[in-house]
Amino acid sequence: MKPMQDISSPQIKKIHKGKVRDSFRIDDKRRLIVATDRLSSFDMVLDTKIPGKGAVLNSLAAWWFDKTKDIVPNHLIKTIGSNASLVHEAKPIKIEMIVRGYITGSAWRKYEKGGREVSGVAIPEGLKKNDAFPIPILTPTTKEESDREISRKQLIEEGWTTEDTYKQMEEYSLKLFERGSKLLKERGIILVDTKYEFGIKDGKVILIDEIHTPDSSRFWSAEDHVKNPEKVEQLDKEFVRNYLMEHKKEGKYPTTLPGKIVEETVRRYETIFKMITGQEIMHVRRPEHYLAACLEDEGFMKDGFVSIIMGSESDLPHAEKMKKIIEKYDIACDLRIMSAHKNGEAILNVAEEYNHALEPVAVIAVAGRSNGLGGALAANLSCPVISCPPFTDKVDLMVNINSSLMMPSNTPAATVVDPKNAAHLALRSLNLHRLKNIISDEIVEIKEGLKAADKKIRF
């Protein structure tokens, strides 16, 4: 099983890249949220990925959304594949509502140093590490580049939200925590603390993001907490935080994790999913391929994409000939204009999108004299690049063909003069079984046509 890392699609616009989740625009009322296998801690994203983590987060959040929808409506429409969810569009409220049932983590570290309040909430004297609060407390933080503790009064004064909206979020958060604690207690799990995020849809507060996952919550074994409260087994990513703190050097946390830590983190995520839902998490060997197939089934994207990139607007008639052929095969096709010499930085933006595309991608470069476009694209893209220069006549071809044929080393751009052939090569390079079958039938048809013509002439 390979981890899902950075993903994109030229057919679906990415509107936000978070620490763990990527958001894509479906339409004005819906977006797609993809939970990757990235892992964040202490406001940074680690270089090491956790295979299967995104599937656990996405599936577990969906399970909890269903179990709590009677308390507060949420943004989930349906899950798509194992890593993605189709959700209602909502305007996020830039506050994390953190509910704490026990004193641990950052709250304990602050308490141990003499602090007796968190986000303006007073904490009683005499508590020991991992003790339960008399009643759960709510300690909000702002969603900025670095989360900031802030009191309820400050939130209102600084304009983060209104008094009425905050009251609703507070009421919902405490009820959600109560429901989560009750359901988890039945499964031998303590919901230690968690965060909730809300948004506004049609003027009403709804629950968004995730709920009661190992990324957003701390979970303990109830049995272990009774035996040894200060060394209770952690069933969440606090295990990773502890490793990072233990290996902090010169004020910096490591950005990579050793294999044994990755394996244990995978085990913990899978274990907590099964303990909560009673089911095994579904893993797929290549989650990006599976997600692409699911999105195709939903009608959100086609199974392949060809981009025709022109050097100037004058190349449009040449490009449109190829686009017409490509779209006959139900392949998505886009026309772009950029110059390797005049705005080469645009090529890097294309590379960022195409190199992490969910679907197979091919690129046709349309530039003639001094064709730097095909080479620049091939040097930066991991997908096939085909140069099809728009030569005006045979003289133009003879004089300028060399600029397309001769490429630097490690710059594998093919050159095809005929636009029809360039379009068909792009289609074949997508390597889709559906197209292979269609093209095989076309080859047979051509052969049969030649046989018929030969027979007609001979007899």
Image (cartoon, rainbow, N blue to C red):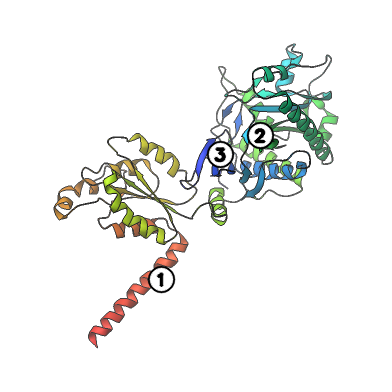
The residue at the far front in this view is 203
Nearer-N-terminus badge (1/3): 3
For numbered disc 1, what is the local secondary structure? Answer: helix
Give the image quarter of residue 137: top right
- In this view, the mark in front (3 or 2): 2
Query: Percent from the top left, x then y, of residue 76?
Result: 67, 44
Can you say whether 309 is above or below 162 in the image? Answer: below
Q: Are the residues tagged 2 and 1 within 8 Å (C-beta)?
A: no
Total numbered labels placed on residues in the image: 3
- In this view, the mark in front (2 or 1): 2
Specify few, some or many for label 3: CA neighbours under 10 Å numbering under 14, 14-19, or 20 or more: some
Query: Percent from the top left, x then y, of residue 265?
Result: 65, 37
For residue 384, side relative to residue 186 (left or right): left
Res. 441 mark:
1
Query: Percent from the top left, x then y, of residue 94?
Result: 63, 27
Q: Name the residue under label 2.
A: 199
For numbered disc 3, what is the local secondary structure? Answer: strand
Nearer-N-terminus badge (3/2): 3
Specify few, some or many for label 1: CA neighbours under 10 Å numbering under 14, 14-19, or 20 or more: few
Q: Which residue is drawn at 65% across and 43% down?
A: 58
In front here: 443 or 226? 443
Q: Residue at x 29, y 57 (%)?
A: 419
Specify few, some or many for label 2: CA neighbours under 10 Å numbering under 14, 14-19, or 20 or more: many
Q: Is residue 116 visible?
A: yes
Q: What residue type is labelled 1?
A: Asp
Q: Is residue 193 visible?
A: no
Q: Which amino acid does label 2 sit on?
A: Gly
For residue 186, side relative to residue 143 (left or right): right
Give the image quarter of residue 325: bottom left
Res. 22 mark:
3
Q: Are the residues tagged 3 and 2 within 8 Å (C-beta)?
A: no
